[in-house]
Image (cartoon, coloured by chain):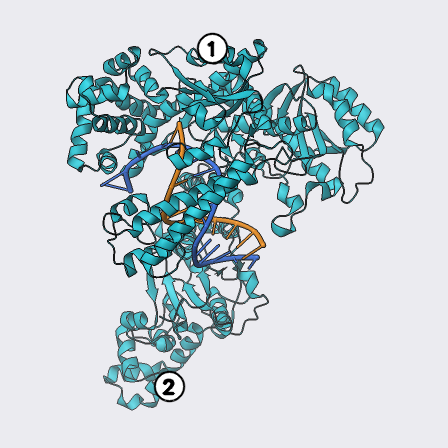
Chain colours: A cyan, B orange, C blue
Amino acid sequence: MIMGQNKTFYLIDGSSYIYRAFYAIGRLTNAKGMPTQAVYGFNQMILKVLRDEDPDYVCVVFDAPGPTFRSEIFADYKANRQKMPEDLTVQIPYIKDLVHYHGIPQMELEGCEADDLIATLTRWSRDQDLDVVIVSADKDLMQLIQDPHIRQWDPQKDKVFREREVAERYGVTPRQMKDFLALMGDSSDNIPGVKGVGEKTARALLEQWDSLEEIYSHIEDVTPPSVRKKLLEHREAAYLSRKLVGFKRDVVIERGLADFARQPTSLADLARLYDELDFKTLIDALRQEHSDIGPVAEETNKAQIDNRLVSSQQDFDDLIVRLKRHKEFSIDLETTSQDPMLAKIVGVALCWEDDSAYYVPVAHEGPNSDQQLSRERVLRALEPLLSRDSFGKIGQNAKYEWVVFKQHGIDFRGIAFDTMVASYLLDPEKRSHRLERIAAEHLGEGMLTYTDLTGKGKNQIGFQQVDVTQAAEYACGDANIAWRLMPVLKQKLADSGLVTLYETLELPLIEILAGMEHRGILVDSNKLESLSIELEKSMDQQTARIYELAGEEFNIQSPKQLAQILFDKLGLRVIKKTKTGPSTDVNVLEQLALEHPIAEHVLAYRSLAKLKGTYADALAKLIHPQTGRIHTSFNQTVTATGRLSSSDPNLQNIPIRSEEGKKIREAFIASPDCCLLSVDYSQIELRILAHYSQDEHLVQAFRENADVHRRTAAEMFGIPPLEVTPEMRRQAKTINFGIIYGMGPFGLAQRLYISNTMAKAAIDRYFERYRGVKQFIDASIETARKAGYTETLLGRKRAVPELHSRNRNVRQQGERLAINTPIQGTAADLIKKAMIDVEGALHQARLNTAMLLQVHDELLFEVPVKELDDARELIRERMEQVWPLSVPLTVEMGWGENWAEAHA
DNA sequence: ATCGCAACGTAC
DNA sequence: GACGTACGTTGCGATC
């Protein structure tokens, strides 16, 4: 195969596809009655090229209007071609826009047809050693396929023509194609050809003689005589025809290769065009692929607002006076770091009206930074407004501002609206809730982005280096957008019935999370360090043994190299495959361990490496230099179900199950005179399932505070609970969790190492004993299917479009989401409310107990030892009474010097 | 050097 | 293809 070594240039025959699309598809119009089928068909072709081929270089080529050399040498060229129908003409500008929005260069040149440009560009590309794909269904172009680096492809029929395929289809070589066409003529272009000679005769002639010249120089040998006669009669027409079907190849290409590189798709523009033409399925598809396309905006232009730079004391005093007259304003801080614990304030943007915003630079160092007020002075003047609830603050991710202000000694109170959180509640599955995206979706406006100002990669500069004037424009834009988004988002929250959830749960939670992040958790860095050294030693031992067993050294951490050793060199069985090769995951290695000792050493190595790399070493790096504590980030706008997530570092996945892993937990310690108190909800998801399903057995089990897994085992095996063995209980536990996740027979079989048949029987048996659960599952799916979304106890919503998919797998995925989301999401709702209630009660009781972490069903507190009893009582009360369910909610508590002890 | 993806593994 | 929700590390190939 010769193709594929070089970069490839895709030359798309635009003109021919315009016609094909127009005539191939029946009449299609948008709501306003404008014909759209050519645009639609053209778009399908483009999508196919982009998706299937992902071209390096690409150009769509169109005929230029007006005469060409062909009409000069033959007045009747295309004379019988009708003028382009009006219905098609109106679609042309849309097609050209479409091509542009797809990021594809386009070209047309006066006096040239598309074919001439394609011929020229083909030669031009070959001169630069590019492979060429001519995207066309036109046989005229096949004369260009004269070397193995050129092929023609029709994306609609997905047919590729190389030399061989041309010969197969037409019985002539590409080189002969021109003569072939000249003999045949073409009535659609009014190319005369040799009258009376059609495809068959032409092929027969060219099979015998190589070219037109050859034919005529052997004209006396041509048989039958009738053909000879026709050839002689129309000799001139034949040669003229050949000129007409040939191409101009000397068009001057005034571009460089870079001009033909594919550009990024302009998603917003494309969506707008689809919208205008009512290509609804295309918009949906676009959304599926790029979740950050909002509804289509009328205009994506930036709003013009009056940005006012506040650099004098007088202007600033004036600003404060005016600000005080308003009871709500939006605020956006510009700082030196994305990490609020390290960030220093560089400037403050404020906005309280639609058409203007203010920027107060306080610590710029770059261009135009000669006139600015001091940070200290500005913050002290703003403090009374910032710390008072009566001034409502609007922000995008106000938690960030809270922590930054706290680091600057200011209590930031009265968060009245957070655009990021609002956007999240409206659609929790959006990939991004950045302000740019929210603005595009809900205001239809574009914005300056952070990286527009600071750049990225190694050339990135700190915000303090940004030109003050530019910074003002950017920061004012942010503050203004947040301000103007508030009423829009408020309305949408109201329309979706999300106001209570927003105001009573998510908004109050912001300050609590901010407090937890700012407080951090104390970590024993010495402990982490000695653990790391210990782990390293153990890893070295395993490494040596693994190399010995493998007979060579390799990178154990590379699944690819490991697979090569295990399966190629040692010849072990391939048990499971990944997309890229044989799998080497835990399940596989555990099975292989029965056959070869290397597997258990790899397993040991893996778990040691995980502990060292992901925990011991990584956590040590994130200890804050001043506080000696780890300040995770609790993300409120990430998960599809309403849970929080934690990052930098993720403190929600600290090991607990293995003995080795627990050592990591031992490094999380209490402050002096305090202990860590861990409080976790017992079986909260199963209790929620009991509450929702009202299943007789499940409800009863929880009301009697029984061991629910034991009960399930007893029900399943039809024996008294006391006779349940640990193995039976384990299996029942797996089923209980499986139900919550919507697990099928296959999944259960995998987990329990039993047959599919057995698993199926087990599930059937479960549903037989737990009728209410079965009904709940069916009803959940049905409700979600009808409503289009599923909902939690406190009214959190998640769309489940999968339930309407024609694809069975996707639909089943939707069914699992419809089961799991209300359960997982309700648990998330409840613990969030518990956090708010507990925080309020601790404050009320004047206790100094501080909430440090949330791990989905667990809250971790730092408690002064002398208030431990009070705190325990208060916390238990608030958590267990968080919401009245039809089964009791109970918590389990533990405390100690470190997190491992607290959990015991 | 930087980015993005795959594979893997930790938690609830 | 088959069990829900996350985040982070390493390797590795592509890209700049």
For the point 58% across and 66% down, the residue is A256
Does the image show residue A44? no
Nearer to us in this view, A106 or A370: A370
Residue A747, by quadrant, is top left
**Quadrant in the picture for the C terminus of chain A:** top left
Q: Which residue is mark 2?
A: A213
Nearer to us in this view, A817 or A571: A571
Q: Amino acid at mark 1?
A: Glu
Chain letter for the residue marked with disc 1 in the picture? A
Question: What's the CA distance linking mark 1 and mark 2?
Answer: 105 Å
Q: Is residue A864 left or right of residue A602?
A: right
Residue A472 drawn at (x, y percent):
72, 37
Question: Does A583 appear above or below A837?
Answer: below
**Nearest to N terminus: mark 1 or mark 2:** 2
Q: Residues within 10 Å of mark 2 (few under 14, many from 20)?
A: few
**Quadrant in the picture for the N terminus of chain A:** bottom left
Q: Which residue is mark 1?
A: A873
Q: How many marks?
A: 2
